[in-house]
Image (cartoon, grey):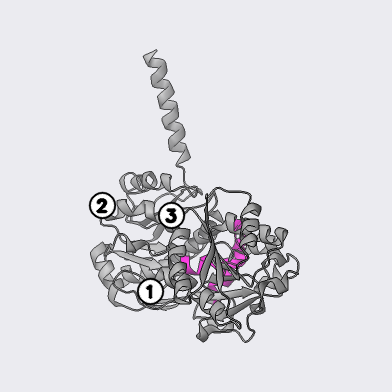
Amino acid sequence: MNKHRLHHHAGRLLAALVGFALATVQPARAVDALRIGFSMSLSGGLAVTGKPALLATQIWAEKVNAEGGLLGRKVELVYYDDQSNPALVPSIYSKLLDIDKVDLAIPGYSTNMTAAFMPTAIERNLLVVSYFCLALNDQFHYPRYFSMVPFGPQPKISLSKGFFDIAAAQEPKPQTVAVVSADAEFAQGAVEGARENLKAHDFKIVYDRTYPANLLDFSSIIRAVQAANPDIVYVASYPADGAGLVRAANEVGLKTKLFGGSMVGMQSTPLRMQLGPLLNGLVYHDFWVPDPKLMFPGIEAFLATYQARAVAAGTDPLGYYAPPYAYARMQVVGQAIAASSTLDTDKLAAYLRVNVLHTIVGDIRFNQDGEWSKSGVLTVQYQGISGNGLDQFRKPGTYVVLAPDEFKSAAGLVYPYSKLHD
């Protein structure tokens, strides 16, 4: 019996180890390779952003290696699929650090995944250059934390500030708001900031609902929103639920003046193509769109390289949202290593804290809590979408930038939202 149980447990252990296999077949490890390890959401709900982020990271590593590597060593990426499940993150990093012996461990994608990484990072004094996290360091104040997302010094507020500022500027001024949010760390952080913004404009909340992150049918929520008859509908969501809410709004025939908010996933080309004209009139946050005012040095060359490989990689064919920032994150890490000539995390953090970093999404300076010193959040409205074809999403006119003023498009807000969905 004991022998049988021993074989049984050995089999389960082997299966678990196989489950930790690398997401792709990787080359044999060079003796002197500089190994950078991370988790990435390559399956599950966050894969729509995780997959393009991985390709962008690989493009960075290939470029760095073609130029001689870092510290005279070729860069090797070691990564595992966290399946969009925060519960898997701690064990992935234990493996990366204790078995794979990576030289540098960086977090994966999103607030939820990185929150699960932070206890390990703090315990082991790791450098944390996070990727698309909302105000995560508010709860840790970790001195080696830096955020690769343009939220600025007030992340929760800046995410929806443009949305509510634009609403308040309409004549007559709207008065009432429905707030709909996912029960997830990012969404609840976004809602916290939204409440500050709507309070600043004296908007009144007439509907407030937090839904389970795994909810599939959103029609009842939209019907309840419609029954409250708000002037503004603000949503904080992740990709699958955000798409579900957009579909439900169109199916139910939502009548409101402004609809959108902090909706992760609405920036994804595959989701844009799936939803097509259903997106018209939606006002949402974005970080980069193909507008002449946003053509920072290097970004066009990067996107050309990315797009040439995206179809074969089975990922976002345009890569406007996640990939530039995934690439820029690695530029920041690479610049710190090259300039400091070390992997010592205290020295790398000291460099990042005081220097301007040059990236394909513009020049960046971090503040004391690791956030950007200036917000770069765009407030954008979808306009003129017809059908589900790809080419229309290459055009600047599809994305009308409403804020900030320095990147504002010539076209203005189409208002009210219902005007586009009668």
Residue identified by numbered label 2: 123
Any part of residue 235 in sight:
no
Where is residue 376 drawn, in percent x and y?
Answer: 46, 77
Most common secondary structure along the magenta stretch: helix
Q: Disc 2, disc 1: CB below 8 Å?
A: no
Cα–Cα gap, marks 2 and 1: 25 Å
Viewed as shown, does residue 249 lie left or right of 387?
Answer: left
Residue 315 among those drawn in magenta:
yes
Query: Which corner quadrant of the image does residue 16 belong to?
Result: top left
Residue identified by numbered label 1: 372
**SS class of the residue under badge 2?**
helix
Q: Residue at x 30, y 55 (%)?
A: 121
Q: Nearer the viewer, residue 352 or 96?
A: 352
Span of residues in magenta:
300-327
**SS class of the residue under badge 3?**
helix
Query: Which corner quadrant of the image does residue 288 belong to?
Result: bottom right
Q: How dense is the environment of label 3, judged by Cα within 10 Å: few (below 14), some, or many (20 and up)? A: many
Q: Nearer the viewer, residue 206 or 125?
A: 206
Disc 1 residue type (three-letter): Trp
Disc 3 residue type (three-letter): Asn
Q: How many marks?
A: 3
**SS class of the residue under badge 1?**
loop
Residue identified by numbered label 3: 112
Q: Nearer the viewer, residue 412 or 325?
A: 412
